[in-house]
Image (cartoon, rainbow, N blue to C red):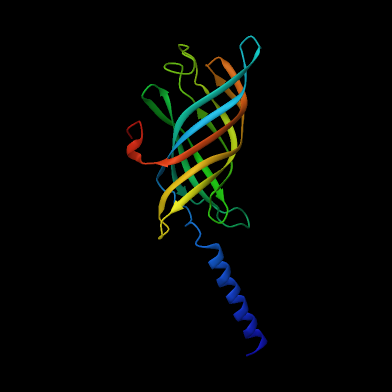
Amino acid sequence: MSTRRRLQGFLSLVAFLTALALGPATSAQVMDGVWFKLTISAKGVGIEPDGSVVKAKQKFVSYMFVSNFRPEAGEGGSPSAGYSFQIFHEAAPGVWLGDVSGNMLVLGPNEEFLDTLQTTFYGPDAVGGGGGKEGAAHTGFDGVFNGEFKIKTDARGQFKSASFKSLGGVAPEGAVDGDTSFAGGFTVKGKSVAQESLPFDL
């Protein structure tokens, strides 16, 4: 056997053993048409209308719908993997609005790491929440964060379930109780849920 053939055989064996060690990767963009229940928690400071600074925090639940897309490749690059998302928040008791949407890019061999994303998280309106002030604006904040999905699939690579947690969330601007501005840090945690469990009709 020639040296070249022995080398080719050795490299093939290495590739095979590496594949066995790593195991099957998650199929690309398997979260197509998946709902997540999100719990958003934020802590920071509030600036009152008179300029006084107070400690402030927010916590509320939102729902996110995820579907896949593959954006165009940049110059000299290959197409990135991504998901479209739409976030639903409770604007008033029993009234849910899906007025935040966009695209997110995911990275890594299993496409589970969320690249830096900037979006808005709305809390409940003053009516039935947000401190109970009539006519107050939305609570919530603009947020910048990274995140990580944990995706489970079956033996065929089909989606089973997923969880999500944010990494390094910063909220540079927001509102508490409508008339108090807010800035601080935040976390987002979530898990996939069945569409039938949503608290609103589509």
Residue 171 horizontal/vertical position (percent): 61, 29
The number of callouts visible is: 0
Who's the residue at 57% across and 71% down the image?
Answer: 17
Q: Depth check: give the residue in front, 78 or 65.
A: 65
Who's the residue at 58% across and 71% down the image?
Answer: 15
Q: Depth check: give the residue in front, 151 or 69.
A: 151
Residue 46 horizontal/vertical position (percent): 61, 18
Who's the residue at 55% across and 67% down the image?
Answer: 19
Considering every residue shown, the one lying at the far top of the view is 50
Residue 194 placement, left or right of 72: left
Considering every residue shown, the one lying at the far front of the view is 21
Q: Is residue 186 above or below residue 163?
A: above
Q: Is residue 131 above or below residue 110?
A: above
Q: Is residue 90 above or below residue 6?
A: above
Q: Classify the position of the C terminus by image quarter.
A: top left
Residue 36 horizontal/vertical position (percent): 44, 39
Who's the residue at 53% across and 35% down the image?
Answer: 188
Q: Classify the position of the N terminus by image quarter.
A: bottom right
Residue 99 horizontal/vertical position (percent): 45, 31
- Give the quadrant of residue 79: bottom right
